[in-house]
Amino acid sequence: MFYLVFALIWYALIATIFLIVSIPLIAVASTTFLVLCTAAYVRASKLALGPEAAPVPQPEGVPAYVHYLSGPAGRDLRQVADLTWRETREVGGKAQSWLKKRFFYYGMDNYRRAVGVLIAAGLIAGAVVTALVMAVVALGALLVWGVLFVLAKALLYTLRGVDSGLSQLRGIKLTCPACHHRVVYPAYDCPNPSCDRRHTDVRPGKYGLLRRTCACGERMPTLLVLGSHRMTAYCPHCAAPMAEGAGTAREFRTVMVGATTAGKTRLMLALAETMTGALGASLADEPTRNTITQMRAALGARGETSKTLAEDAVRAYSFNLDRRVVHLYDLPGEDFTDTARLRLRRFLDSAHAFVFVVDPFAIPEVWNSLDPAAQREYQSVRSSQPPGYIFEQVLETLTGVRAKKLADVSLAVAVTKSDLTEGLPICAGLDDDVRAWLADRAGMANMVRSIEKSFGKVRYFHTSARVTRDGVDPHVQDLLAWTLNRNGVN
Ligand SMILES: Nc1nc2c(ncn2[C@@H]2O[C@H](COP(=O)(O)OP(=O)(O)OP(=O)(O)O)[C@@H](O)[C@H]2O)c(=O)[nH]1
Ligand SMILES: [Mg+2]
Ligand SMILES: [Zn+2]
Ligand SMILES: [Zn+2]
């Protein structure tokens, strides 16, 4: 009986001591483990962002680096997780072998073994707590990433919206001067002179919000307001260079209309000289600079420009004039006798103004009034199609292709080659009133009526494309000024 009581007290005592010792032991062991694992996590994060950072994938397809939040952030998170797993496993392994060596080499009767069991229990508890804490940390990181990602996306669309909104507000629409397609956003070459990569769409997106990084490392702006217009722009459809200022200035498109040999190219050149001379415009792109230089040289050398080749694609001649991009389109005359071909000229649909070049020698009344000697003299500069026929072709095509009506489109009618017709009896009075001369004297009343019925703004001019020592013919300057003013370009 006494022994039983004694034994009970003894076991109770032992149990109390065990509890008093074991609970703190477990707590200390688990806390220590948690601290070690936290240290492992910090170490892993440092490694993941430093010496053991996941390699940055080289750009492929698009020649730019993906923006941090759209790719590398996820990659870095995964790398942190991988390295943390590696480091904590190492801590776990070390704890295990330490435990074995210190406590489990002894027999069942050694007290160390009991302590070992307690510490092991502490470590397991610590591992469970660590796992929970890590899960919370990982979720937190994912959540932060997600929120930043969503914010960045929102910012991205806001920026895009502001950029295109500003353009829309200022009435800026872009067309390619070479293939004449509508361009939503031009492509840009990397501004680094030793890099020849072209970026097709630099707008805010996967590759950067305000700036993107080219594969060569150069940073480039993503928005017009941030200066992307200062880079050379290219058409994303046909890769031709766009006019300087494209995207920041409103476009003004004028089409030269008239038969072969009517004098469209020469008048276009006279208009170009007026713009670059009196109006202080500049040639807006390399192709324009090249062809205008060639034409000037040809005119200087042999007093002639070449015929516009019918097979060639038509590229606009582009000018920067008073914060506007002015495009002049000079078609081959053959187009105007072939409505199927004319219809394919995309810029007809979006042109703001037309210049109708009327060759007086092609007007039957005028030609028939000349004596044979004069006819022989002018035969080489005479266009064979009568202006009335050409205008009918143009009108038929325009009413077919244009969504917008012609009521707010301007038409300047230029009866040209005035330097050659000067003094011809039939041309008396032409200088005073071009419209009256056409209608009453030249027998073109039908054409005049048709012109005024279709176009909203019409004016007649008597021009010469010849540039003399006094400069460009003042009537050409009048024609240009009228066309620009009618369309709000000053
Ligand atoms: N003297 C004089 N000659 C002109 C004038 N305008 C055109 N010409 C001459 O007329 C011919 C035809 O002129 P272009 O400007 O090439 O005619 P175009 O309308 O462009 O003809 P295509 O290219 O075939 O459609 C050339 O020999 C010019 O030199 C002018 O105002 N005065
Ligand atoms: Mg021509
Ligand atoms: Zn193009
Ligand atoms: Zn580059």
Image (cartoon, grey):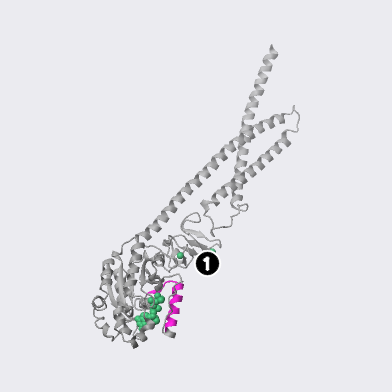
Residue at image position (73%, 33%) is 104
Residue 240 placement, left or right of 166: right
Regarding residue 34, the answer to whether it shows in the image is yes
Q: Look at the picture and state if 442 lies above or below 398.
A: below
Q: Look at the picture and state if 335 lies above or below 222.
A: below
Q: For the residue carrying disc 1, how many other residues have a C-alpha within 10 Å: few (<14), some (14-19), or many (20+)?
A: some
Query: What percent of the width, then of the height, locates residue 319?
Result: 39, 72
How many marks the image carries: the answer is 1
Query: What percent of the width, then of the height, locates residue 85?
Result: 62, 43
* Predominant SS of the magenta segment: helix
Residue at image position (30%, 64%) is 406
What residue span does the magenta drawing correspond to? 281-299
Q: Quadrant of residue 417?
A: bottom left
Residue at image position (52%, 53%) is 68
Query: What percent of the width, then of the height, locates residue 138?
Result: 55, 42
Regarding residue 171, the answer to whether it shows in the image is no
User: Residue 251 or 196: which is nearer the viewer?
Assistant: 251
Query: What percent of the width, then of the height, locates residue 14?
Result: 67, 23
Q: Secondary structure at mark 1?
A: loop
> Which quadrant is home to the N terminus?
top right
User: Residue 243 or 148: which is nearer the viewer?
Assistant: 243
For mark 1, what is the residue?
192
Q: Amino acid at mark 1?
A: Asn
| Mark 1 residue CB less than 8 A from any atom of ligand 4 | yes
User: Residue 217 or 47: which is nearer the viewer?
Assistant: 217
